[in-house]
Image: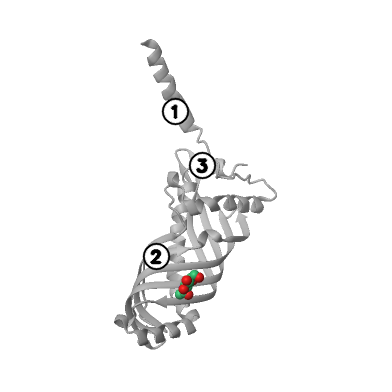
Amino acid sequence: MLNIKHLLISSVLLLLVSAKTTKLPSFLHICHRSDPHLNDCIKKSVEKLRPLLSKGIPEFGIPSCEPLRIPEVVIDQGAGPVSVKSIYKDIKVYGPSDFTLKHVKIDLDKNRVRIKVWIPRLELISDYTMDGKILMMPIQGSGTSHGNYTNIDATIIMQGQQIKKDGDVYFNVKDFYVDFNIGHASIQLDNLFNGDKELGEAMNLFLNDNWRQVSNEIKPVLEDTIASIFKKFSNKIYHKYPLEILLPK
Ligand SMILES: *[C@@H]1O[C@H](CO)[C@@H](O)[C@H](O)[C@H]1NC(C)=O
């Protein structure tokens, strides 16, 4: 009887001890802030996360990013060359994990990380409804939207701050900025104008001829949406381990 009691107590103690020592998962590649090649080290850490980004990290509540799923994006522009109300639902973005890291720069004093990536190709599929005017042309429809975006340069800036929690210092991403530069886009909106084939085809041709202007108008909303998704994901990792463990001296 005493032995079982002992065993129980010691296993509870063991559990408590292991919970306190916060064992790091193997996918976290740790860099030291004194590392003279800190930027390269962080580049490696991000590279190491790539396979996990496509699979997702369930223990961190991070879903698969291949495809990246965005529940809804609403664009409601009253003025300018693109004045439409459009709603994209159940957006699936294929290709984000295929990025090439071009550049990583960490500024320890300012708690800021700047990352440049290149993505060869993104394919977006979603449901859409749209009503308004694009470059003076009336547009209206609802159905499936397809888009292929190639040769994308993206700049990401993570502005963080250090916060205290239970006596430890943690990194918190306060602002996450994403800026895209798209090399080429090809779009297809199915079922425009209640399925009128001729009008729909003409409109799709028109949209593709003017893809840059069209995507420039919707770009800011997409950038903000993607930024807020990745801000949430990064904080799920940063809030789990003290800065002293993630970025030791
Ligand atoms: C996007 O690319 C896929 C695969 O190459 C192709 O099947 C599809 O037709 C393309 N869609 C558009 C809108 O260009």
28 on left or right of 67: right
Which residue is more in the foreground, 243 or 74? 74
Q: Nearer the viewer, mark 3 or mark 1?
A: 1
Residue on which disc 2 sits: 91
Please tell me whether mark 1 sits on a helix, a strand or a loop.
helix
Residue on which disc 3 sits: 242
User: Along the polypeptide, which appears first: circle 3 or circle 1?
Assistant: 1
Residue at left offset 64%, top offset 50%: 41
Residue on which disc 1 sits: 15
Q: Residue furthest right?
A: 36
Residue at left offset 53%, top offset 67%: 121
Please tell me whether mark 3 sits on a helix, a strand or a loop.
loop
Choose top left, top right, bottom left or bottom right for residue 67.
bottom left
Question: Quick one: label 3, few (<14), some, or many (20+) residues within 10 Å?
Answer: many
Question: Quick one: label 1, few (<14), some, or many (20+) residues within 10 Å?
Answer: few
Q: Is mark 1 within 8 Å of ligand 1?
A: no
